[in-house]
Amino acid sequence: MHITVLTLFPEMVIPFFTSSIMKRAVDKGIITYSIINFRDEAEGVHHKCDDIPYGGGAGMVIMPEPISKALDKIDAKGKRVVFPTPSGRLYDQDYAAELSKCDELIFICGHYEGLDQRVIDEYVTDEISIGDYVLSSGESASVVIIDALFRLIDGVIASESLEEESFSSHLLEYPQYTRPERYCNKSVPDVLLSGHHRHITQWRNDKRIEKTMHSRPDLLSDASLSVDERNRLLTILDKEDRRWILSEL
């Protein structure tokens, strides 16, 4: 996959592509990337990229010309162009999986009060929100979106690791433990020390259901539960007098 990021602040994005798992994916050739400072396309001595909004209001809006020129140079029309914005479609694991199948993605990082709507109408295919809150930069949101999708590409992370992660089956991940065996007067659960793989698998499945029920019961309506897992859920609901949740499933 080739990822292009259009930004006024490349220094906010470069470290992500040159560190950790992404760096390994780049080194393997699984991911290639380009980071474009669209300020280079702005005219004038100061390469101004923002101006006051028509109709009045606080703040500044990114002008259409510099970013349009940058998009045209990479033939963006007809490609998947992502613009992170609080008013976009909410991002989730299924959306990340969809984007991970693309051969090329282009990200536009907004700033100030937003981006001239004509650029969005002309080039953008996906307006994406990473949550119901506002960030000061599109760079942060773009990195979140990229981080969630690139790790789903074959060869980036072992498939067995992905299968056990949160949201892989619309359930949250089970608790994890490592050495030392006892810490802060708390011990690792005995089942994890037993060496009995079937019991460990059952314990982990139970904990996924319990954690999802307590933290994100809304996910249970889409969870792929086996008969045993659903019975386990019913047992937990009965024990905690929370059967009202069933009405939402």
Image (tube, rainbow, N blue to C red):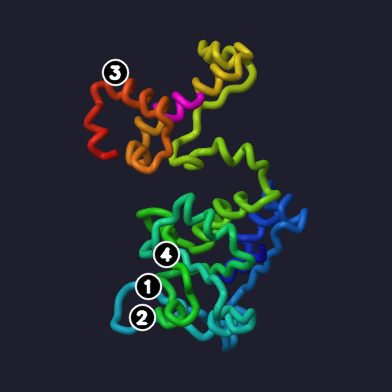
Depth order, front residue of 131/13? 131
Amino acid type of disc 2? Pro
Residue in the image at 42% along x and 59% along y:
129
Badge 4: how crowded within 10 Å, few (<14), some, or many (20+)? Answer: many
Q: Is residue 46 visible?
A: no
Badge 2: how crowded within 10 Å, few (<14), some, or many (20+)? Answer: some
Which residue lies under the disc numbered 2?
Answer: 53
Which residue lies under the disc numbered 1?
Answer: 59
Q: What is the x, y in percent for residue 170?
A: 44, 41
Sequence-wise, the earlier of marks 2 and 3 is 2
The nearer-to-camera label among 4 and 1 is: 4
Q: CA distance from mark 3 to mark 1?
A: 54 Å
Q: Quadrant of residue 86?
A: bottom left
Which residue lies under the disc numbered 3?
Answer: 239
Question: Quadrant of the image for the N terminus?
Answer: bottom right
Which residue lies under the disc numbered 4?
Answer: 85
Sequence-wise, the earlier of marks 4 and 1 is 1
Report if residue 209 lies within the magenta region.
yes
Sequence-wise, the earlier of marks 4 and 3 is 4
Secondary structure, mark 1, is loop
Amino acid type of disc 4? Thr
The nearer-to-camera label among 4 and 2 is: 4
Sequence-wise, the earlier of marks 1 and 2 is 2
Badge 3: how crowded within 10 Å, few (<14), some, or many (20+)? Answer: few
Q: What is the x, y in percent for residue 105?
A: 59, 67
**Boundaries of the magenta span:** 204-210
Do the residues under discs 1 and 2 have CB atoms within 8 angstroms?
yes
Q: CA distance from mark 1 to mark 2?
A: 8 Å
Residue in the image at 64% along x and 53% along y:
153
